[in-house]
Image (tube, rainbow, N blue to C red):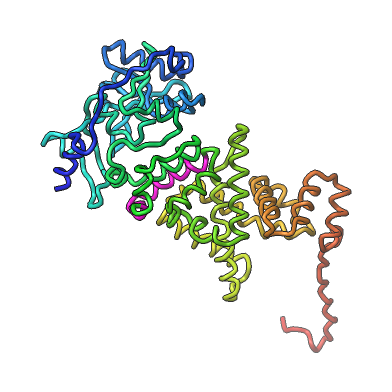
């Protein structure tokens, strides 16, 4: 039944493919020099073997908007195996849809084969969907026209030919970009059921590219939001990471709340934003991340997710303490519980989880400003991340700003000034723990001596 329904969808009964509008260079103004060297090499090599090869998707979209793309994808009529044979440094990846990654030095170009429309009986075995309509596997190849129709939004269905410098537009995406309009190709409800992550992508593209979501494209989102629960946690994490690292994380999170897509993704979006202190902390973290990305400064996903989950950790930590668990063990238990619960919704990789824990466990240590403890904390390899996290807590009103000011002075102070600061923070720096002297045993009288 599902296969027959998908056949109707992709045969054009629900949406109809169009002949492309070919937009010349003198209209769009995108020259070959705007395309990365690796993408040009891949496209030229494929075309030299009489395959078609176009730069596609987000790269074309961003070039038309005047942005410099971070990566380039190429679409071709060559199969993954044929692409693999052409490039020594390449590999086939993917299960849901097979792709080829071609490496040129440190640059990587993703090459996809045109996806097909209505599958034959033999091809239908390569396409599978779950009971909600979400496509699980789709290795049916087809024509460029079918591939354009299979893409999610019109602005992502643009093809750029590096040889002729023409843009091929099947669904009016060029005009939508000029009008700053985000529009789904085909029936929005069905397309969201095929892949619920498209709802998150709609929010990300609209917020990060300053676009308005078309009314018909927006209409089904709130009702279909629960379908995100059927998406694998690892894929949700990948999409949420793109959203949060877009440079427009603040706008994206606000849009998620507006569209009703925030429930279940992160505790911070469900509960924390309903708490004034937690909301202020999270928004400061998002704004700081956006500023760093726009200024081309490095951003740590570990720090960002540590910020987003902190108030969930804090609430759990306080609960364990109220049950009589000592402070430090209570914090460790809280961290483990929050990460374990989160893993069921959004699979944060272990490499990030370890860094997040280090940032969290340093926080109570910043309140210990006497003796050798501050010196040991300065030597911690993650001190800078923990210190920045502390400043964020101070700025949100969670911690007394004087604590952050103390650590700022202490980090840059000389030895004498540090010693003076330590005497103000508690136990004087010069005080040493005295060893208890054992009382000498009185000499035993001869008759009290122990027997030999």
Query: Where 320 sits versus 63, above or below?
Result: below
Check the picture and name the quadrant holding the C terminus.
Answer: bottom right
Residue 232 included in the magenta stretch of the image: yes
**Percent position of residue 266, x then y:** 47, 55
Identify the residue at image location x=56%, y=49%: 355
**Percent position of residue 423, x then y:** 86, 59
Residue 48 or 68: which is nearer the viewer?
68
Q: Which residues are magenta?
A: 225-245
User: Is 74 placed left or right of 422 in the picture?
Assistant: left
Residue 96 or 31: which is nearer the viewer?
31
Identify the residue at image location x=60%, y=48%: 285
Identify the residue at image location x=67%, y=47%: 388
Q: Quadrant of residue 10?
A: top left
**Percent position of residue 278, x then y:** 59, 58
User: Is 259 placed left or right of 172 in the picture?
Assistant: right
Residue 273 included in the magenta stretch of the image: no
Residue 374 visible here? yes
Toward the left, the furthest residue is: 121
User: Is 229 placed left or right of 243 in the picture?
Assistant: left
Residue 88 visible here? no
Q: Main secondary structure of the magenta part?
A: helix
Q: Quadrant of residue 205?
A: top left
User: Is 419 placed left or right of 156 in the picture?
Assistant: right
Identify the residue at image location x=55%, y=58%: 273
**Percent position of residue 299, x then y:** 58, 39
């Amino acid at each position: 039944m599902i296969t027959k329904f998908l056949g109707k969808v992709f045969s054009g009964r629900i949406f109809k493919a169009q002949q492309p509008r070919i937009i010349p260079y003198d209209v769009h103004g995108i020259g070959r020099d705007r395309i990365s060297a690796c993408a040009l090499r891949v496209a030229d090599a494929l075309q030299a073997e009489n395959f078609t090869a176009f730069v596609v998707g987000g790269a074309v979209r961003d070039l038309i908007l005047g942005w410099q793309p971070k990566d380039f994808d190429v679409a071709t009529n060559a199969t993954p195996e044929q692409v693999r044979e052409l490039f020594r440094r390449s590999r086939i990846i993917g299960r849901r849809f097979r792709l080829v990654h071609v490496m040129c030095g440190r640059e990587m170009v993703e090459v996809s084969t045109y996806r097909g429309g209505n599958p034959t009986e033999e091809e239908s075995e390569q396409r599978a969907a779950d009971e909600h309509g979400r496509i699980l596997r789709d290795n049916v190849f087809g024509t460029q026209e079918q591939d354009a129709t299979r893409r999610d939004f019109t602005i992502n269905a643009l093809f750029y030919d590096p040889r002729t410098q023409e843009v091929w537009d099947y669904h009016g995406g060029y005009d939508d970009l000029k009008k700053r309009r985000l529009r789904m190709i085909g029936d929005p409800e069905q397309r969201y059921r095929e892949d619920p992550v498209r709802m998150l992508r709609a929010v990300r593209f609209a917020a990060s590219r300053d676009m308005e979501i078309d009314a018909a494209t927006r209409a089904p989102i709130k009702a279909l939001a629960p379908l995100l629960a059927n998406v694998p946690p690892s894929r949700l994490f990948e999409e949420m990471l793109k959203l949060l690292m877009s440079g427009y994380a603040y706008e994206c999170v606000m849009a998620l709340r507006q569209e009703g897509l925030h429930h279940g993704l992160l505790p911070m979006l469900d509960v924390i934003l309903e708490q004034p202190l937690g909301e202020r902390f999270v928004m400061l973290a998002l704004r700081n991340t956006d500023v760093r990305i726009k200024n081309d400064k490095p951003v740590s996903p570990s720090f960002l997710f540590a910020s987003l989950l902190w108030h969930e950790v804090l609430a759990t930590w306080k609960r364990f303490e109220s049950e009589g668990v000592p402070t430090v063990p209570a914090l460790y238990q809280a961290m483990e519980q929050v990460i374990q619960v989160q893993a069921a919704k959004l699979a944060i990789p272990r490499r990030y989880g370890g860094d997040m824990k280090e940032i969290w466990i340093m926080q109570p240590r910043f309140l210990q400003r006497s003796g050798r403890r501050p010196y040991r904390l300065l030597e911690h390899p993650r001190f800078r991340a923990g210190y920045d996290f502390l400043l964020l807590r101070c700025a949100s009103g969670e911690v007394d700003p004087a604590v952050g000011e103390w650590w700022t002075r202490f980090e840059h102070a000389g030895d004498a000034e540090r010693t003076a600061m330590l005497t103000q923070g508690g136990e004087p720096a010069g005080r040493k723990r005295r060893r208890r002297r054992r009382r000498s045993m009185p000499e035993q009288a001869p008759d009290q001596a122990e027997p030999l």
